[in-house]
Amino acid sequence: MYEHEVLDSPAYQRVSAVYEQARAKAKEPDGPRAREAAYREALRWARKAGDGAFVAAAWYYLAKFWAGEYEREKACTAHLRLIAAENAKFGPLHAELAGSWHNFGAFLVAAHEPALVECGMRLSLALGRLQGGGEDFAAVQQTILVLWNAKLCDRMFRWAPHLEGWTERDGLGHAYRCLGHAYGRVGRHDEAQAAYEACLGLLQEGDARYDDARLGYAESFVERVAPKVRMPAKVLAELRALVDGAGESSERQRAMKSLLACGTAEDLPRIVAVAAETPLTVRSTCLTLIARGFDRDAIHQALRDVAARASEVDIDSDITRDIEWQMNRSRAHEALARFELDQGMDARAALQSACQAPITTDLVGRLALYLLDDGDAAGLDALSERHAAVRGTMLGVVRAVLELERDPTEASMLAVYRAFAAWAKPWAARLDEDGKSSARRADRSDD
């Protein structure tokens, strides 16, 4: 049975009543088509009523419905229409928008743009501060939970110190539980255990989260150690030859995975070199190395050596104009950056180097968040210029958030909204003001 959410606000209650009346007239009132039609009927009613609060409520319900149906582009557009209605009704700095920006940030986890997820949460926090309060611990906790859902462990670690001074046991315990999971995910087991211990000291025994934290605490001991496989000397020599050879990348990767289980300190450079060819595998490779007892600093240095070698140029050749060389260099620095992000190291230099090439990974957003933390407008402008074709509109959002955090005014908040709208432009024009898909396709350019 479909459950419709009825919020406390009078506007939401009134729109809910219109929705229920419209749904009751359908032949199959619990079916998705009937529910969508009823929500759109509530939106039409709200627009005729002329009250922005009604319109915002109607878009909220459509956003929630479409998100549940995995209609992500429609849901994103509905979130932005909701915020536009609240901007017009209450003003862009009104407390009413804090929850809307938070919900939008949480929704953007599905967009796979780490910078946009955090931007939505930072807007919510900024609006909370503008209402005259101090640090909104509950909002910080929610930010950490959303970042966990987005698998952005390094950003969780960045926000964790903001929980200092909070005393709400359940909320704080939940945050420490997620931090424990995050530290464990990247192989930082001492910090994971400390987070789990803090969680278990706050939550009540018998709570589902308590049991989950207790299991995570136990797992953090198990995951510390990986067995070493004893390999016959001849087989070990053959594995090393395969890893060092010029064969297919897939074969070298397979050989590296076997060597990972049986290699010695002598093999660390060759293992890391092959892992760096596919940066997204670096975390799992390094976790196994750490569990096998390899020193983190030695792993870090091996990755730095790989990046340095990838940057070497023969001054007598035209290799600097060679796309393959650029991409190899980018991958090597990406591998280094991902390790540094996981281990809480300063990854700025590696990120900058990785983002010199026209990469399509999430690292452009990761670098943008670093620059946002630093208040580096010039750095963001340079990054936007370099990646204008693919990441330009996303970086425009980060740049607007930087200006808002410097000078929170109605104008700077509206600029953030316009930047988000520009990012959503390729699909937003396909949805009319009544929530119906338009036959006309949106212009996909960023102009």
Image: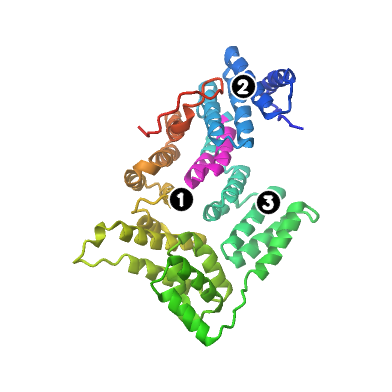
Residue reaching furthest right?
Answer: 206
Cα–Cα span, label 3 and label 1: 27 Å
Q: Using a 10 Å C-alpha cutoff, classify the residue at mark 3 as few (fewer than 14 neighbours), some (14 to 19) or many (20 or more).
A: many
The residue to which callout 2 is attached is: 40
Secondary structure of residue under mark 2: helix
Residue for point 38% across, 72% down? 246
Is residue 100 magenta-colored? yes
Give the mark, 1 or 2, whose residue is nearer the N terminus: 2
x and y percent of residue 141 in the render? 62, 47
Query: Is residue 318 shown to the viewer in this render?
Result: yes
Amino acid type of disc 3? His
Give the mark, 3 or 1, whose residue is nearer the N terminus: 3
Closer mark to the observer between disc 2 and disc 3: 2
Residue for point 51% across, 25% down? 431
Is residue 149 magenta-colored? no
Cα–Cα span, label 2 and label 3: 37 Å
Secondary structure of residue under mark 1: loop
Horizontal arrangement in the rendering, residue 240 relative to residue 218 (left or right): left
Residue for point 46% across, 62% down? 340
Q: Using a 10 Å C-alpha cutoff, classify the residue at mark 1 as few (fewer than 14 neighbours), some (14 to 19) or many (20 or more).
A: few
The residue to which callout 3 is attached is: 174
Q: Are marks 2 and 3 in contact (CB under 8 Å)?
A: no
The residue to which callout 1 is attached is: 362
Task: Give above or below for 223 relative to 18.
Answer: below
Secondary structure of residue under mark 3: helix
The magenta region covers 97-122
